[in-house]
Image (cartoon, grey):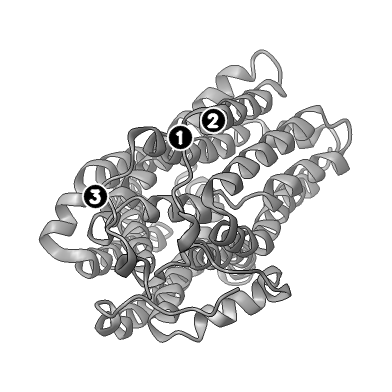
Amino acid sequence: MGMTDQTVLPKKPAPATLIFILSSAFLFAMGLGLLLPILPYLVGRYVPDPTALAATVSWLSVSYAACAFFSAPVLGALSDRYGRRPVLLISLLGSAIGYFIFGWAGTLALMFVGRIIDGITAGNFSANFGMLADSTAPEERGKYFGQIGAAIGGGFILGPALGGLISHISLEAPVFVAAGLCLLNLLWGVLFVPETLHTEQRSKGLSIQSFNPFSQILELLAIPHIRRLLLSSTLFMLPFAMMQILLGVLLKTSLNWGPAQTSTVFMVVGVSDIVVQGLLLGWLISKLGDMGVARLGLGLGLFGLLGMGLLVGFPSSGLVYASVLAFAIGEGIFTATVGALLSQAAGEQQGKVQGGSQALGSAAQVVGPLIGGQLSSRAGIAVPFYAGIVLVALAGMALQQGSSASGKAPATLPEI
């Protein structure tokens, strides 16, 4: 029996719970953003060769994403068994420890240790979405998932600006600020946030399979309407991951932009996340429905990638901002609505489904930059963006196949 059959869900989460969920998402994004201006300089202390520096910075990112791939489904399953609150608190503590080690590191090896610890405890999104689903009725989730996207956008705006400002104190200062903010949010959770997953709604046990992300993902992919949503989401995430890595290179080579001009593009992305997901997404869902908004997001993503690819032959500042804005809006509304659809399909095992989704997203963050780098070096900087158009089109096909299943009852997943 599904959770919605057993109990009537509230329309919205309690204020303290919503603050905790949104602040966790905000701090996650801001923590990553704080590192962006200083990471090359911190790593440069140990890697003086510019070519090796770029590779080392990339591997730091890959180490975090790879660990998140393995840990997210496990922590999601643990949140289904033991509750959302302890998993979220452990995730925040792990992030704080990871940041402290990274900031205090006197060697490159310890910097990797810090990022790995943060990645291993990166289950905050699977448990975060689970806590939100526990606290809201299914038809309200798209709006609140959009608010999480807006919080992430705000973190990505504030993070780089704050990191650059605090770095005048020391290069390590932004890292310690990120750790301190995680601890403050941990304290808020300990003092004010109750558990949202009641004992009778929890999974009944754990098996060794629960700690194997591949078996968990395969189990989810065996369910047709969940498989199609996960496939669509992952296919869209691949060009998003490629764009994050290659956009700066594209702007440098095609328009000869420097860091200051490029940073304005990422600020546009953050502002669009706040405005569209925080303010407009609920209205869009009321007019178009979740599936309609997801299709609109895919269409905007296609337009954005096409515009970015055309920049090589038609360099234009206007085309830069139009393309990036279209892709950012498309990605934001698509991710929020597909997340809501997954939540509706997940039934009682929110953590398991959202953990699988987060793991696949982490895998895309590893695979996307690797594919994009190879395509760029072998065929030109525009080719990864055109390849992204194909991937988004395939995401649309997967979503369309799953649209007929979107109104079905929540999936029944095996106990773990």
Q: Residue furthest left?
A: 287
Which mark is drawn over residue 214? none
Query: In the image, is residue 236 above or below residue 84?
Result: below
Residue 47 seen anywhere in this rendered image of the structure: no
Q: Are marks 2 and 3 in contact (CB under 8 Å)?
A: no
Can you identify the residue that label 3 sits on? 11
Q: Nearer the viewer, residue 367 or 123?
A: 123
Residue with the mark numbered 1: 23
Which residue is painted at 52% across and 50% down in the image? Answer: 84
**Separation of marks 1 and 3 at Cα, in angstroms:** 20 Å
> In the rendered structure, are the residues bearing label 2 and label 1 in contact, judged by CB atoms less than 8 Å apart?
yes
Most foreground residue, 379 or 168: 168
User: Few, some or many C-alpha atoms within 10 Å of disc 3 (few <14, some 14-19, many ≥20)?
Assistant: few
* Quadrant of the snapshot with the N terminus: bottom left
Of mark 2 and mark 3, the one earlier in the sequence is 3
In the rendered image, residue 160, in percent from the top left (x then y), is placed at 53, 31
* Left or right of residue 404: residue 392: right
- Percent x, y of residue 73: 60, 64
Identity of the amino acid at label 3? Lys
Q: Amino acid at mark 2?
A: Asn
Query: Residue drawn at (56%, 81%), measured in percent from left and top?
Result: 219
